[in-house]
Amino acid sequence: MSRRVAVVFIFALAASWNSTDCSAEDFPPVKNFGDVTGRGRNVQRTMRLLAESTPEHRNTVRVLFYGQSITEQGWWKLVANDLRARFPNANLIVENRALGGYASQLLVKTAETDLYPFQPDLLIFQVYGAHDKYEDIMRLTRERTTAEILQQNDHVTKPEAFTEETDPAKLPPKGTHWDAFMNHNWLPAMSKKYWTELCDQRAIWKQYLTDYKLEPKALLKDGVHLNAHGEFLMAECVKSYLRYDPALGPSPAEQWVKTLVVGKDVVWKDGKLRVEFTGTRVDAISRSGDAAKAAVRIDGKKPSEFQELYGLTRALSKPGGKWPPIAPIQIQALPLLEEWTLEAQADPAASKLEKKVYTFALSGSKTGPDGEGRSDQRFVSKSGRMAIAPESWGVEFALMLSGVKPAPDKLTAKWSVVPHFADEFVVPKSEAGVEASVTLAQGLANGKHVLEIEGGDAIWGLRVYAPRK
């Protein structure tokens, strides 16, 4: 069953909304955030890192906003600016990779290039669409990252929301109460299953509208998207969950990321640092000292010999915009670090079909010409390095969101292979209190591994990431 099909259609028509600049002083304050007991429990690692940052030791915290057109709106900047103001000593890296118009059944495809490789400490996430694909995003985030997740439920768009059923036991997945089922049954269940922090902005929204005797449309540009007042309220909702409270105790994520200090937890022996670890990612960290070269081996091999340690950038087309016409593209065999180019041509013999069929040729900047295929058939390149499934093609929708309609008969798509590893590296010298780090391997199977480093005297420690199984 699709989640709010009509809303997804609206997103397709209004894929990207310009936001109105606003500040908290422009609108009446939130009087009642509800019961805040325990609020923020599952994002305490992120909040601890922010709160414990000092000028001498500025913790790096990576925050990713991911979703659709609502997530693209300006409220996310209000949240980011608030974090920077409250925690000026933290080294905050904040990105928004939302794609307006992409419901969960599309966002789960772009997550391969946009979400998991970013490796956020905190993911702030909301999406409409098919609920099973929504869960796929949550599950894969848990399997492939150590991110804490702030999971937003839906804001209020209709007066009927005030009288909706809220008892999950009375909300089976079938019926005419899909919004209520999602917000009061399914989303809370997913939050418990995947240990997220559920931001119940729907309840805060209802209370705010009630307090000021407002209709839902007073906070909206249309039937769904936020006006400046709505952006202010959504930011306030999210900010209320981003609080540090030591009394809550450590969040689960504290067990997923471990720092091993050289000389204490691990030691040099015969010019090598040998560490047995369990996880998917390991970084080398420097806090001071001169740069020094080091060579890396994992399980006796160079990291570059592991196919799973390579990634791809988002495929972008000309004509087109930020929406990829093909996603995901799979790495089928050990790749080279190169740029790939796909030249596509609509098949005139299939012109009567509802969806265009493209024939194409693929080439790599190092591999060279690597085969030809059709968009309605599974394709594996001659080298075996790239594979594209028929369901990965979404040219017409992606280009429509980019303002290109009808889709042209010819287009060029490009993407690159990127490394999530280092065979050899120079440990950079840390500056201004910020740890310098190098990712030695990211994307390993979540199991036991042996890391060996030769050289690199400036290494202060190692940080190991082991997503919850």
Image (tube, helix red, strand yellow):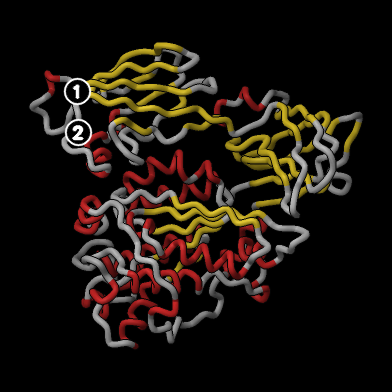
Residue at coordinates 71% horizontally, 58% vertically from top-left?
58
Residue 24 position by quadrant: bottom left
Residue 412 position by quadrant: top left
Residue 229 can be seen, yes or no? yes
Q: Is residue 72 left or right of residue 261?
A: left
Of residues 466 and 98, which is closer to you in this image? 98
Dot 1: few (<14), some (14–19), or many (≥20) neighbours within 10 Å?
Answer: some
Q: Secondary structure at mark 2?
A: loop
- Which of marks 1 and 2 precedes in the sequence? 1
Residue at coordinates 67% horizontally, 30% vertically from top-left?
422
Q: Secondary structure at mark 1?
A: strand
Residue 164 can be seen, yes or no? no
Q: Is residue 372 left or right of residue 286?
A: left
Q: Which residue is mark 1?
A: 346
Residue lying at the far right of the rendered structure: 270
Of residues 46 and 342, which is closer to you in this image? 342
Q: Is residue 342 left or right of residue 446?
A: left
Is 305 above or below relative to 41? Answer: above
Residue type at tag 2: Ala
Residue at coordinates 47% horizontally, 28% vertically from top-left?
416
Residue type at tag 1: Ala
Residue at coordinates 43% horizontally, 57% vertically from top-left?
125
Residue lying at the far left of the rendered structure: 352
Is 139 above or below relative to 221? Answer: above
Mark 2 and mark 1 in contact? Answer it, CB < 8 Å.
Answer: yes
Q: Which mark is residue 407?
A: 2
Q: Is residue 321 left or right of residue 90?
A: left
Q: Could you tell me how far apart the alpha carbons at marks 2 and 1 are, in whole angstroms?
A: 10 Å
Q: Position of residue 200 (x, y in %)?
A: 42, 72
Dot 2: few (<14), some (14–19), or many (≥20) neighbours within 10 Å?
Answer: some
Q: Position of residue 354 (x, y in %)?
A: 12, 33
Q: Position of residue 187 (x, y in %)?
A: 39, 63
